[in-house]
Amino acid sequence: MDITQSMRDTWRSLPAGASAFLKRAPLLFVAWKLLYAAVLLPSGEPDRWLVRVLGESTAWTLNLFKGEGHYRVRHVEKPSARESAVLESWAYVYRPGQRADIGIATPCNGLELTVLAVGFVLCFEGGGWRRRAIYAIALMLGVFAVNVVRCSLLTVVKTDHPVWFEFAHKYLFNLVGYGFVFLLWMRYVKHSMDES
């Protein structure tokens, strides 16, 4: 048996839901990347808005739990290091009279994780459109809330324990964000399968 026939047999042996997911996911991924590259990235939206709201929410959270109203946000746009023709949004969270405690850039705004999370729900067969919509909204709000907590805690780590900042930024809090999405996905799959 040649490899092509083996691949066809493997494809046919997949459960219907898995093959539907594997058909939809690449199409959705390509559509998202084209939309982002052609429309959203050049316009700066929704990145600019997300960075702004994330910065404001981070400062609000820090003031609520730590700062007694001293944290502020300064918004800046500067040329992207990755895309020379594109302006990248930054939100600097700071206390007056001091350097910025943390800078929140476009790659930190959670958009890619949100799209990944919602894309999974849209590609997964089962649960019906009403349930998909509810989970998609819950994932969007949840990813944003986790990102606010992440940025707030990163600010605390950077000011109080700077030696741990890089580890927390690159590994620990990314694990928490992806872990949160994974747990919501598992809940969605479980409820969708229970309903079937």
Image: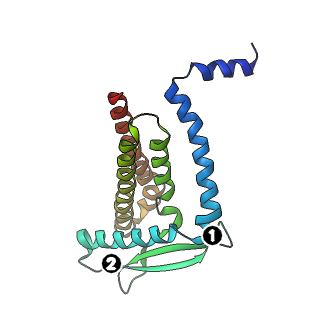
Residue 93 found in image quarter = bottom left
Q: Which residue is mark 1?
A: 42
- For the residue marked with disc 1, what is the amino acid? Pro
Q: Which residue is mark 2?
A: 71
Quarter the C terminus occupies: top left
Q: Is 38 placed left or right of 140 in the picture?
A: right
Where in the figure is residue 22, as x and y percent of width and height? 57, 34
Give the mark nearest the N terminus, 2 or 1. Answer: 1
Residue 148 found in image quarter = bottom left
Q: Residue furthest top?
A: 1
Quarter the N terminus occupies: top right
Where in the figure is residue 71, as x and y percent of width and height? 32, 78
- Mark 1: few/some/many CA within 10 Å (<14, 14-19, 20+): few
Q: CA distance from mark 2 to mark 1?
A: 31 Å
Q: Residue furthest bottom?
A: 97
Camera sees residue 39:
yes
Q: Secondary structure at mark 1?
A: helix
